[in-house]
Amino acid sequence: MDRKGMTLSQHLMDSRLCGNVDSKGAEDGDMAGLLTTLASTAKCISREVNRAGLVDILGFTGDHNVQGEAVRKLDVLAHGMLIDALRSSGYVCALASEEAEHPLFLAPQEARGPYVVLFDPLDGSSNIDAGITIGTIFSIYRARSTAATLSDLLQTGSRQVAAGYALYGSSTLFVYTAGAGVHSFTLDAGVGEFRLTHENLRMPERGTIYSVNEANYPRWCAGVQRYIDALKDPDGPSTYSARYVGSLVADFHRTLLYGGVFLYPADPRDAPNGKLRLLYEAAPLARVAEAAGGRASTGNEDVLALQPTALHQRVPLFIGSAEDVSAVEASIANAPSRSR
Ligand code: AHM
Ligand code: MG
């Protein structure tokens, strides 16, 4: 049966019946409901992103977030929309956002559900004012009980029961994995429905695109420098092209479709532990990559195996086609030990 064009709700219903969406215990259906809540909120964020310039919500608020970065008005708006929608959904007991220093634990008198959700409300926000593709990234775990604690938010990425993102670009997309396969939907804005455009996406085992902010080259470790040098070798086995949007979610989506590798290495001057956040960016995209046959590494460890120690922890990130990511790891491992 050609399922293309099927709505997200139909797809979730079908997947649930097939056992492909987390549905343990008494909360059968909660995951489908939670993903629907996220997708509905993404539609609202998409609307605000599209009309941002018309209603004076571009630019900065004047505040700084917990990472010390200037906060943009749309960051705050998207953060608030997700908190409000998830908090009242009845599916979650704790939330954590890249834009908030502290997590939110729902009180016993609130309608609480079995899941915790961590999210980057608007990834790529430095691109907002230029109308370049940005997105929302989410990560979902089960809590041990609805009286969740910080440890329920600090789980290894391999324990995610679902993850995905919305992309606000030339179209609005919603991409998720919840156990089996990675599925991508495109918003049919006229009727307000996400419709299935790719089911069971597979990332090519090897690609020919690398994606990195190459201005940082002089400060990378020798292993990463050598890896990039080798990609440019005219006598090398393949010819690579460079593509870098500067919105992780957009660079990742291209990598998911076309293959290759996205790199954000550590940089001793500006990002000694890497720039990207483990819980809001690296782990959810690693979960999507692995479900599509790809990989994500910190350079010497699988991202999904990392035990988080802090909510806003950063990590170096190498993510994409399995063979490309393994090649970066090999280059780092084989570099002289003091300059890895
Ligand atoms: P943010 O917009 O949520 O703060 O995310 C950080 C962004 C990523 O989307 C992107 O990959 C990276 O920062 C780009 O960094 P740089 O400008 O240093 O290349
Ligand atoms: Mg981000």
Image (cartoon, grey):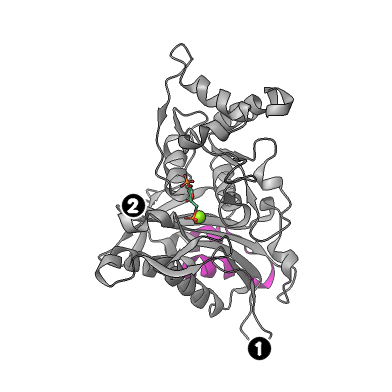
Query: What residue sits right under mark 2 in the picture?
Result: 132
Residue 297 inside the magenta-drawn segment:
no
Along the viewing direction, whichever of 21 and 304 lies nearer the viewer: 304
What amino acid type is highlighted by mark number 2? Ile
Looking at the picture, does residue 316 appear above or below residue 224?
Answer: below
Which residue is depicted at the point 65% across and 36% down?
299
x then y, percent, for residue 327: 59, 26
Residue 122 is at least partly visible in this image: yes
Residue 20: say if magenta.
yes
Question: Residue pushed farthest front?
Answer: 269
Q: Which residues are magenta?
A: 13-37
Mark 1 crowdedness (10 Å alpha carbons): few <14, some 14-19, many ≥20: few
Pointer 2 local density, CA inside 10 Å: few below 14, some 14–19, many at least 20: some
Q: Position of residue 66 (x, y in %)?
A: 58, 64
Q: Is residue 59 left or right of residue 176?
A: left
Q: Residue at x 58, y 70 (%)?
A: 30
For the C terminus, the image quarter is: top right
Residue drawn at the location 71% of the way across and 54% of the way down:
308
Element at badge 2? loop
Closer to viewer: mark 1 or mark 2? 2
- The kind of secondary structure element at disc 1 is loop
> Which residue bears the numbered disc 1?
109
Residue 185 in picture, x, y percent from top left: 39, 55
Q: Nearer the viewer, residue 280 or 23?
A: 280
Amino acid on which disc 1 is placed: Gln
Judged left or right of residue 65, residue 197 is left
